[in-house]
Amino acid sequence: MKGLVLESHGHRVLARILNEEAPVVQATLRGKIRLQKLKSTNPVCCGDIVELCYNQGTGDWTVESVEDRRNHMVRKATNLSKQTHALAANLDRVWMVCSLFEPRFSGGFADRIALTAAAFGIPCHLVLNKSDRWTVEDRNLAEHWRLVYADAGIETWFCSALNGDGIPELAEAMKQGTQLLTGYSGAGKSSLLNALFPGLQAATGAISAYSGKGTHTTTAATLYETGPGTAVIDSPGIKEWGILDLQPYEIAYHFREIREIAPACRFPNCSHSHEPSCAVQEAVKEGRIHSERFLSYLSILANDNQYN
Ligand SMILES: Nc1nc2c(ncn2[C@@H]2O[C@H](COP(=O)(O)OP(=O)(O)OP(=O)(O)O)[C@@H](O)[C@H]2O)c(=O)[nH]1
Ligand SMILES: [Mg+2]
Ligand SMILES: [Zn+2]
């Protein structure tokens, strides 16, 4: 029997049996699946389609195999870590849910998520939540980021889970396929899902007044089916997004602004970090490439060199 994984907890998953009026079942992974995917902290993740088997004798369900994924979002637990962690599989879009403050927006963090989505061929959007708290200057800052990401080929949405601004538009955009919400803890992913899909009851948490950082309220990625063939995945907040091993040219390729200008560099294998007659560096100086994105690129490049 085929099942859709709704939650994954290491070697146990929660899955819904497909094409049947069956309830959700808990199933344990067969040892061979664990061995096949040793490098991953979670061999099966939400959004996976699995083959389930019911054991008459024990009354237990097991996951026999995992179908090949169309795509997935995978990161390293930290930059130093060798192990990978799969957030979710078989996605139609990734939403980077951020706020300007509490937690503070970080272009470097968003760019790492965007790079990963691009590397797996998944369209990615930016959401700036908590617009109810913006002053005029804050809104200008939000508009600035919107321009930066428009040049990167990433659409930005402003919204507030609190007062409902921008929610109908977002709800409409999420009515197709499977959507993953990811980002820092406390940015409002779960609140947003509750505002977008009333009745969902995703758990939310208050920001700790002491640290200004969110408390980790969502503990496991959870897939919620929102209609026939449509789903949203809430995921636990992330502190650091470790990029998988990508070659320098792949990193440059997935920064759209860099990809467009790179053919004008003198050296075909230019890394745009130190080479003479680099068209990308020139474009940054002239403001045709936003310096925020270029700095992200350089920092990702430097990390990678460290580990290769
Ligand atoms: N002012 C304001 N506060 C919000 C908004 N959305 C969420 N919050 C608050 O931000 C805090 C964190 O919200 P969550 O929805 O739990 O954040 P999360 O991104 O799911 O966090 P994790 O599950 O830890 O990753 C809560 O106190 C929410 O009430 C918003 O649009 N405006
Ligand atoms: Mg949450
Ligand atoms: Zn160059």
Image (cartoon, rainbow, N blue to C red):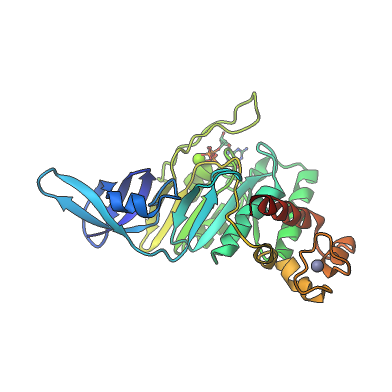
Q: Residue furthest front?
A: 308
Q: Between residues 16 and 99, which one lies in front from this camera angle?
A: 16
Res 182 seen here: yes
User: For residue 260, which quarter of the picture?
Assistant: bottom right
Numbered disc total: 0
Q: Which image quarter is the C terminus in?
A: bottom right
The location of residue 46, given as percent across then percent down, is: 40, 52
Q: Residue at x 33, y 44 (%)?
A: 11
Q: Between residues 270 and 254, which one lies in front from this camera angle?
A: 270
Q: Is residue 84 left or right of residue 286?
A: left
Q: Is residue 6 left or right of residue 275?
A: left
Q: Between residues 89 and 29, which one lies in front from this camera angle?
A: 29
Q: Which image quarter is the N terminus in?
A: bottom left
The location of residue 262, given as percent across then percent down, is: 77, 71
Q: Between residues 98 and 270, which one lies in front from this camera angle?
A: 270
Q: Check the image and report above or below for 109 versus 151.
A: above
Q: Check the image and report above or below for 174 versus 100.
A: below
Q: Residue at x 13, y 43 (%)?
A: 58
Q: Is residue 211 left or right of residue 21?
A: right
Res 125 seen here: no
Q: Residue at x 58, y 38 (%)?
A: 186
Q: Check the image and report above or below for 259 versus 225.
A: below
